[in-house]
Amino acid sequence: MKGEAGFMEQLLNSNEHKCQCLHIFYVPHAGHLSISLRFLPAQGTRVWMGNNSCFCLWKVFKPYQASQHDMCRFHSEDYIDFLQRVSPNNMQGFTKSLNAFNVGDDCPVFPGLFEFCSRYTGASLQGATQLNNKICDIAINWAGGLHHAKKFEASGFCYVNDIVIGILELLKYHPRVLYIDIDIHHGDGVQEAFYLTDRVMTVSFHKYGNYFFPGTGDMYEVGAESGRYYCLNVPLRDGIDDQSYKHLFQPVINQVVDYYQPTCIVLQCGADSLGCDRLGCFNLSIRGHGECVEYVKSFNIPLLVLGGGGYTVRNVARCWTYETSLLVDEPISDELPYSGKSELPFFLMSSPEILGMFYSALTRANVSALPDLGDGLSHAWKCPRPGWMGFGLVEGVPAHGRGLE
């Protein structure tokens, strides 16, 4: 996509438009690395379409490429070394490693795999660094948000967990980091990483039940040891709409922020929670999804905004374009600007509802199944840690009442 590269190179070299409060990290050529895969999100296309709409309102950075050392802040050296060495041409010689590191079906090997991981991870890491140094108030990396990756393995289209690595960077300066996840899938990799510490509170809104991937995210998963009650899950059913989601999201986040007093927030904006997503089953509109972003922004706390899932590319592009406009407080047209790509759709705010999902997911039974959030945040729940979960935790992250190691 020569036109795409030329457009962004021109933008990156321009000094006419600078914004001191919001920085966005553009990962060039990511689409070339993943676009041929059947379900792996076409990152370059999704990100570029979002960036193209109101580019003059922020300062754009070509991100730092994360090194193997950076990735090993969380992941094991053996796993990262494997990602660096494996390719479609030699993968037959890595049969045992492919199985051991869960690389194959949902996480296929493709040309440029390690470069892809390095670019999106470096963008999240650089965004966290700029927030730490107070260079910006909001940093955006739509190519990031790969929340399923574990310490020792890939999972759910996610290879390197840029979120965990970004949070570890934030913890160098921030005593408490709040992680919020609005992807339709549970943010299991991030929850697992910080399950034993109170320096990171994780809050995930997601579909749960009926063997839906990844199978975690029950409301009784609340953390353990120093992190007990610093993990909050809001399990949801199919078809939840804007109004029901808003009536859950805003009170929960308001109480969490009031109780936890975070000094920085990381927001994962997976767009597979939109209606009509190929793999999703919620009924959120782009405007409803964006209301969550706008509400989190309203707390005026340093904010790292990341992408995530989303498998109907045209809707992901619309969604992240709209949410970028909310983050820069600048209205945008309902139509995407001309880009030379005739197949790009109009940017329409309203997304068709999923047929057969006009009901609200919040039936009385589902509401009664949710915890009393006030009690859940201020009192101990007598809930054992699930014994079937295999944890790969972050090492060296103490409780915020203790000194940093």
Image (cartoon, grey):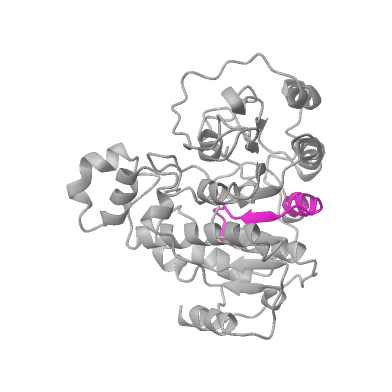
Residue 121: x, y in percent?
48, 57
In the displayed orientation, state which residue is furthest to the top. Answer: 382
For residue 207, what is the image quadrant? top right
The part of the image, by quadrant, that contains residue 198 is: top right
Residue 288 image position (x, y, % from top left): 76, 50
- Visible residue check, residue 224: no
Residue at 66% of width from left, 49% of height from top? 267
Give the residue drawn at x 33%, y 40%.
Answer: 101
120, 4: nearer the viewer: 120
Percent position of residue 206, x then y: 63, 37
Position of 239 compared to 300: left or right?
left
Q: Is the residue 303 above or below the residue 379 in the image?
A: below
Please give left or right for residue 253 compared with residue 182 in the image: right
Viewer-closest of 104 and 353: 104
Please report the bounds of the magenta region as a residue range: 288-313
Residue 58 in sight: yes
The residue under the point 81% across, 38% down is: 258
Q: Could you say where residue 72 lies in the image, as x and y percent from the top left?
A: 40, 48
Q: Is residue 307 magenta?
A: yes
Identify which residue is drawn at 63% across, 22% down: 220
Q: Is residue 99 magenta?
A: no
Labels in figure, total: 0
Relative vertical location of residue 41 with respect to residue 199 in this rendering, above or below = below
